[in-house]
Image: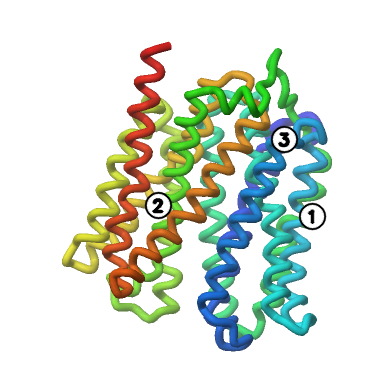
């Protein structure tokens, strides 16, 4: 079929966009120890790099909510890939080129975080408004590619480091820059849906006056925090649970989490959509609370690792599920709705791991206490879904 008229190509380009998003969020942490040793950057300053990434994405989400519809989706989604590619190129060059390596890292992260934030705000509504069957399934499949991208980035990068040494990290960064670079040309020719096809698109003030929107924002906050908290600390659980070397632990923990999260999203796309979405999300949230409790309270290390894996499966449907719920219940939400929900999700992504680490530090770096407190995050979804059910019954 003609690539310029077939919306399946739009879907494929969107999949690649989410692989880019996975590279944006997962490649840099593989280099943290090396940055600490080679550039003499403290772990505290390295930790701030994660905050810079997500705070930049949050700012971009907010701007996209206001201006994306006026500028247009094709130029902005192309720009997202330009920024992502430039960020990876800058990462390979700037730390050694500038007098302060940390400044070079910050500039690089801001560049590709702009790209990541734009993709996050734009790609989901692109899929939602494409003329496709079963939008909930398509949304889950789209978000599963973030999981497969995470696994790909971790495994490929780690394998190259193991084969050729950490000194080749700059070339690996340039290699990941090729993914968004090539997708620039793909998004230039695929058809784009009419995002504002509703008779009336809601403004930001209208959205903020909508009670259901605030409940959905709470769900996104909890979903982001529940997902990223376990994803960031999965490596520590792998090392503690299996007693394996750190390199293996760094791969086994995050990869297991990402694989099971991806399987969950594919499962929901193929089978889970037959269950009403609020009920599916409630079951997932209850299981997620249980997985955090298992990881935190189990006296058997291997069961803590099992809890990590169950968490990956349980959070799989949360983020795409809330997007689908929003498009179903708030007609005419358009660009602003998706961007503001992405902002709420990114707030959870940045605050969840930070709160968990801070609580662990208070209790003498006891990560199990931090994970026990982190069970609050999926509990937010349970509360939000009960509120959603109450609002729905009153309308």
Q: How is the image coloured?
A: rainbow
Q: Residues within 10 Å of mark 3 (few under 14, many from 20)?
A: some
Mark 1: which secondary structure?
Answer: helix
- Dot 3 and dot 1 residues touching (CB under 8 Å): no
Q: Residue at x 70, y 13 (%)?
A: 199
Disc on res. 260: 2
Q: Residues within 10 Å of mark 1 (few under 14, many from 20)?
A: many
Q: Which one is in front in this view, the residue at disc 1 or the one at disc 2?
A: 1
The answer to which quarter of the image holds residue 93 is bottom right
Left or right position of 57 against 146? right
Q: Residues within 10 Å of mark 2 (few under 14, many from 20)?
A: many
Lower position in the chain sequence, tag 2 or tag 3: 3
Disc on res. 130: none
Left or right position of 154 against 300? right
Q: CA distance from mark 1 to mark 2?
A: 31 Å
Q: Nearer the viewer, residue 351 or 2?
A: 351
The correct choice, above or below, for 197 with respect to 279 in the image is: above
Disc on res. 66: 3
Disc on res. 82: 1
Q: CA distance from mark 2 to mark 3?
A: 35 Å
Lower position in the chain sequence, tag 3 or tag 1: 3
Q: Residue at x 70, y 80 (%)?
A: 101
Lower position in the chain sequence, tag 1 or tag 2: 1
């Amino acid at each position: 079929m003609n690539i310029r008229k077939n919306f399946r190509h739009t879907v494929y380009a969107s999949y690649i966009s989410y692989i880019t998003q996975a590279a944006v969020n997962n490649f840099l942490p593989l280099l943290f120890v090396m940055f600490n040793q080679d550039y003499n950057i403290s772990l505290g300053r390295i930790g701030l790099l994660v905050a810079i990434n997500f705070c930049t994405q949050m700012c971009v989400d907010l701007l996209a909510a206001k201006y994306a519809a006026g500028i247009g989706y094709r130029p902005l989604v192309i720009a997202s890939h330009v920024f992502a590619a430039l960020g990876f190129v800058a990462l390979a060059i700037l730390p050694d080129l500038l007098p302060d390596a940390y400044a070079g890292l910050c500039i690089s992260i801001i560049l590709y975080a702009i790209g990541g934030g734009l993709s996050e705000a734009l790609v989901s509504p692109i899929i939602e408004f494409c003329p496709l069957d079963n939008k909930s399934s398509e949304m889950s499949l789209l978000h599963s590619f973030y999981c497969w991208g995470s696994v790909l980035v971790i495994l490929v990068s780690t394998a190259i480091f193991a084969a050729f040494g950490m000194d080749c990290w700059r070339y690996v960064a340039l290699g990941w820059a090729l993914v968004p670079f090539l997708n620039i040309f793909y998004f230039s020719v695929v058809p784009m849906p009419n995002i504002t096809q509703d008779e009336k698109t809601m403004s930001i003030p209208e959205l903020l006056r909508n009670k259901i929107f605030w409940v959905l924002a709470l769900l996104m906050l909890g979903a982001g925090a529940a997902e990223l908290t376990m994803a960031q600390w999965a490596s520590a659980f792998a090392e503690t649970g299996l007693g394996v070397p750190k390199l293996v632990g760094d791969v086994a923990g995050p990869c297991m989490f990402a694989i099971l999260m991806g399987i969950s999203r594919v499962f929901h796309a193929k089978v889970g959509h037959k269950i009403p979405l609020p009920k599916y999300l409630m079951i997932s949230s209850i299981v997620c609370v249980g997985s955090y409790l298992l990881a935190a309270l189990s006296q058997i290390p291997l069961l803590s690792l099992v809890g990590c894996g169950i968490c990956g499966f349980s959070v799989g449907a949360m983020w795409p599920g809330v997007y689908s719920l929003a498009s179903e219940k708030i007609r005419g939400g358009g660009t602003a709705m998706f961007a503001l929900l992405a902002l709420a999700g990114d707030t959870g992504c940045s605050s969840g791991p930070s709160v968990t680490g801070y609580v662990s530090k208070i209790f003498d770096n006891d990560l199990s206490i931090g994970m026990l407190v982190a069970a609050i995050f999926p509990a937010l979804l349970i509360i939000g879904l009960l509120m959603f059910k109450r609002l729905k019954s009153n309308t």
